[in-house]
Image: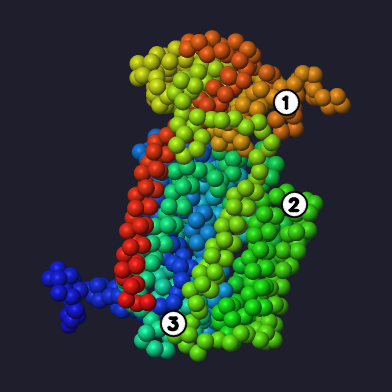
Amino acid sequence: MLHKSQFNNPLIQWIDTRLPIFTFIQNEYGKFQVPRNINYLWAFGAIATLSLAVLFVTGILLSMHYIANTAMAFASVDHIMRDVNYGWLLRDLHANFSSFFFAAIYIHMARSIYYGSHKNPRELLWIIGVLIFVLMIATGFLGYVLPWGQMSFWAATVITNLFSAFPGIGDSIVTWLLGGFSVDNPTLNRFYSLHFLLPFLLLAVLGLHINALHVVGCNNPTGLEPQMPQDTVSFHPYITVKDLLACCLFLIVVSVFVFFAPTYWGHPDNFIPANPLVTPSHIVPEWYYLWLYAILRAIPDKLGGTVAMFGAVLVLFVVPWLDTAKVRSLTFRPTARFFFWLLIIDITVLSFCGARSPEGVWVLLARIGTGYYFTYFLIIMPLIGLFERARLVPASLSEALSLKKAVRGAVLLLAAGGLMLSLAGHAWADPELPAHVWHQSGPFGTIDPQQAQRGFQVYKEVCSGCHALKLVPFRTLQGIGFTEDQVKTIAAQWPYLVDDEPNDEGKILKRAPRPYDRMIGPFANEKEAQATMGGSLPPDLSLIVKARHGGEDYLTAVLTGYQNPPPDGFKLIEGRYYNRYFPGHQISMPQMLQDDSVTYADGTKATVEQEAEDVATFLSFVADPTQDQRKHLGIRVIVFLLLFSGLMYLCKRVIWRDAH
């Protein structure tokens, strides 16, 4: 029997009578009633859904170009950034939305605890939400490994090795996770497969979460259930317009990072290819795992730390039963509200501790923070619900909170989330470096083509004798003003030959590079480089600006920071040179830049400082050749979003005019 459709449009009616999907949408979103006093903190559910959608789309597109092979994974990610049309945008969107997805979920969960959205009858809704959080943690970790940088490799090594702490079965679990006895190609393959598949499971659980919400109804800042028709409004258009406005404002914030600071949340070491023989001085996860990482390291026992870290997440599943209070919203519970804000501060401090070396005061703070975290959920939350005397609760939503109080709660939660993001983002502070004013700095800065061309001259005449740009094709030079013919000439005159196709006898011949070839260096492989350079390995400079704290400032400081003789009392290893800004102050590379090392065609005086700034500008360009395009597009996107946000605000005012 055909379904009786309520729609008048012939096409929609024809579809709906046979597949009543439009009736389903109308019932679930058009007629669905929600409390009229919910504030913008409720929009973070929609923001998180938007983030997941963006991650889905960009992830599928990125998977078409990614190669899950340890020998090619790092290069394939760089290929996406350089050679795929708008590949840089896909990857920057994916990386930044990952961070903001977690930020939205953290605020969403904090709001739920603050206003009692985990309490009866919404226990299952909360449990499904925590399950989504667990799937996010797993998916995010698997994705963090895929770029196959230094931090990716060692994060995989550290985290998978934690399972070996479980007696009896630990080693078997680790072997199963790794696909062998160490992090290698099988590990990357299965992590890639799981990272692709888990989001579909996450999407299915999200569907359950939304369905459970529509069964039990939406909570509100008072924690009271609607009792009269005037207590609620329909989801559409009242809530949809608020969600659209919140999503627009959210997109503006995300766009600032995507287009003007795309690597802000990342770690420089992840722009260095994975090397199992070189351990980073400090292994840190992404910022959204830092509080868990701090809990792991706070306990000086491998098994104890692992259990505590997993327990910190698992305890969230039983929060509905640990909270014994009869009043839902912390708005009416001043004592509980005080301990809640201590918890927010505690997690922020734990995040900061997780980004620091596990020594000194950071270990003490992490242990105190870990203790309070578990104390809050296992002791404070159950007991305070029994003994706290709540303030007078309104009899109905008609006597609900004033707008001032609702806004205050929202602002405090957002401020706490912003503080956590800011602290985590700056957890790895740059060393003290001399500051320079770069033409490419800031949202309106652009690469100076003349300076970049001078920098290429310095690289070619001074640096290329040891350092390659093996990820950078010659055609990239057109981005700093070289013509196509000039690029062909530069490539043809390059001092190092590239491998050609095998001849009829199967022998690999050599030929001069062409514009699509990479700027190779003098060494065929790392072993030859180390043998030639006395054991030292000259780093590839393709991503050196991104791979060092301080970027261009660091490069300029190192190139100009030599001191001979070294300070009194400093013991210099034979064959090393003292440098004020190089880590450990001992560097294998002698001071290569001298006054008049090169002769600039434009007449610029070639001082050491000038040469260093020029080559740093050039290396900034080759590390991110689309940065000017990215910034110009970002300005247009943000202007559009600002205008659209203004339109949504006006629509919201009109729609809500009769509801207030």
- Give the CA distance from mark 1 to mark 3: 65 Å
Percent x, y for residue 392? Answer: 58, 87
Q: Amino acid at mark 3?
A: Val
- The kind of residue on which mark 1 rests is Asn
Residue at the extreme left:
10
Q: CA distance from mark 3 to mark 2?
A: 45 Å
Judging by the rendered image, the residue that carries numbered circle 2 is: 358
Q: Is residue 19 left or right of residue 424?
A: left
Residue 310 x/y as whole percent? 64, 65
Number of other residues with Cα within 10 Å of mark 3, as a class: few under 14, some 14 to 19, many 20 or more: some
| Mark 2 to mark 1 CA distance (whole Å) | 27 Å
Question: Residue 384 placed where, x, y %?
Answer: 68, 82
In primary-sequence order, the first of circles 3 and 2 is: 3
Query: In this orientation, which residue lies closer to the viewer: 414 or 142?
Result: 414
Q: Quadrant of the N terminus?
A: bottom left
Q: Which of these two is toward me, 524 or 216?
A: 216
The vertical placement of 40 against 430, above or below, is: below
Q: Earlier in the sequence, mark 2 or mark 1?
A: 2
The residue where tag 1 is placed is 579
- Classify 465 as above or below 427: above
Using the rendered view, name the quadrant where residue 589 is placed. Answer: top right
How many residues crowd around disc 2 within 10 Å: few (fewer than 14), some, or many (20 or more)?
some
Q: Secondary structure at mark 3?
A: helix
Of helix, strand and loop, which one carries label 1? Answer: loop
Q: Which residue is mark 3?
A: 216
| Element on which disc 2 rests | loop
